[in-house]
Image (cartoon, rainbow, N blue to C red):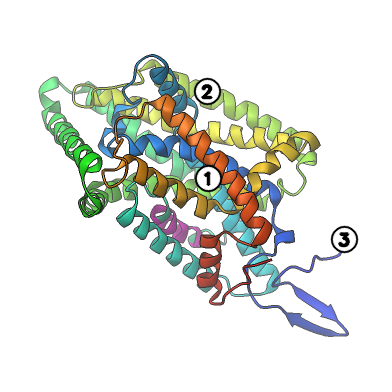
Amino acid sequence: PGAPMPQARGVFHCGGGRMEQRMAGPVAEGERIAVLDMLRGFALFGIFLINVEWFARPQQDMIAGVGPGEGLDGRVGALVYLLVQGKFWVLFSLLFGMGFALMHQRAQAAGRPFIGLYLRRSLLLALFGLAHIAFVWTGDVLFTYALASLGLLAFLPVRGPALWLAGLGLYVAVPLLSLFGGLALGLLPASALAPVQEDMRALAAAGQAAAAVYREGDFLAVSAQRWAEYFGWIFPQATLYHLPMALGCFLIGAWLLRSGRLADLSAQRGFFLALAIGGGLAGGALLALGASLGLRFDPVAEFPRASLASGLMMLGNLPLSLAYLALFLLLASLPGPRRLLGLLAPAGRMALTNYLAQTLLCSLVFYGYGLGVFDAMGRTAQLGFVVLVFTAQLVFSHAWLARFRFGPLEWLWRAGTYLRLPPLRR
């Protein structure tokens, strides 16, 4: 209150009795919320830790839990499974929802149409995702995000607690379905499980065949495998499970941004401390309960148990992700830690470029048309690989943004969204 309105793009400025609306365009560098860029960089590292494993295992093996490994590899795999898997996907989804809310707020403040611009943005994201699936990796999240982002438009009029309650309901519905399915299957006689076990055998066989293609196939063979695999079974699964979960996280993130709690982190330390403690306790309890059922399963013989464990893990991912977010923001509210966390911001500002660069590099390292180490790199070596590559990305991001305003793919995305070429060089 009482502070002058910043000279933001798209804001109405008054001078000499005349009001002028500036053209829609990308957010200027000084108008960015720095802590969101830091959080994106943090989430990008966690996502990489998970994604690298799924370049070394077939996607069909996901229901089996922790990947095979002994000794240090087994311990590293279990820790990443418990503390990272699913949590950073949720964190990145929360950030996506915050970005949507921020974009809408700025369009409203400027009196600009929003929906057409947002639809172009989502269409371009979907095209990035389809190209990613066809030429790089079936574990793509961009296409799912683009589809789920359309659901955000239906919630534009919703305000207040109703927004996060709707998001919570959408998210929780999926793990509850997995829990109820596991419980129901566990009550059936063994003979009644035969069709499910047959499906699991077929899925395991498909995974072995896919692994052979990824390990030994040339680019055309691997690309054909990717396309068939994604639209054969991954996309239907994503539609049923990932879309509502992603939309739920988007809504919770949008509520958090609209609540104004990110505007002054120091004033909101009590809220974020309560969120960190509550989310950590609730998520930790669900995580421990899921882990008590096992970390590695035979999907054919133990599908009901695996489904129960998966449901509990998914339920725990959201509160733990919120706890991670809250702890990060608490640290970012302190001058010393904020300077250290600020090193992540350039990687976060180039999140799309860095995410696709990570998966492209992994495809060249793990697949047959590259180095072909599909199942030859253990989990510990994968962790070292991720740290090395992400460190290089941090250095590159700092160097790139010292000379340019946007990452290369971020610039392309903005150009298509605003239908004009924003200046790239500083």
The residue located at (46%, 50%) in the rendering is 357
Residue 342 percent across, percent down from the top left: 70, 43
Looking at the image, residue 286 sits to the left or right of residue 55; the answer is: right
Inspect the image, locate mark 3, and give the three-letter code of the amino acid beneath it.
Ala
Residue that mark 3 sits on: 3
Q: Earlier in the sequence, mark 2 or mark 1?
A: 1
The residue located at (86%, 64%) in the rendering is 4
Q: Main secondary structure of the magenta part?
A: helix
Q: Is residue 69 above or below residue 9?
A: above
Q: Nearer the viewer, mark 2 or mark 1?
A: 1
The residue located at (48%, 49%) in the rendering is 355
Residue 104 percent across, percent down from the top left: 61, 63
- The tag on residue 181 is none
Q: Is residue 161 in view from this perspective? A: no
**Observer-nearest of 124 and 401:** 401
Residue that mark 2 sits on: 284
**Observer-nearest of 254 and 136:** 136
Give the extent of the magenta segment.
143-153
Which quadrant of the figure contains the N terminus?
bottom right
Residue 51 percent across, percent down from the top left: 41, 39
- In 3D space, how far apart are the residues under numbered discs 2 and 1 (Cα atoms)? 20 Å
Inspect the image, locate mark 2, and give the three-letter code of the amino acid beneath it.
Gly
Q: Residues within 10 Å of mark 3 (few under 14, many from 20)?
A: few
- In 3D space, how far apart are the residues under numbered discs 2 and 3 (Cα atoms)? 42 Å
Under tag 3, what secondary structure? Answer: loop
Q: Is residue 425 above or below residue 265?
A: below
Residue 56, picture quadrant: top left
- The tag on residue 92 is 1
Q: Earlier in the sequence, mark 3 or mark 1?
A: 3
Under tag 1, what secondary structure? Answer: helix
Inspect the image, locate mark 1, and give the three-letter code of the amino acid beneath it.
Phe
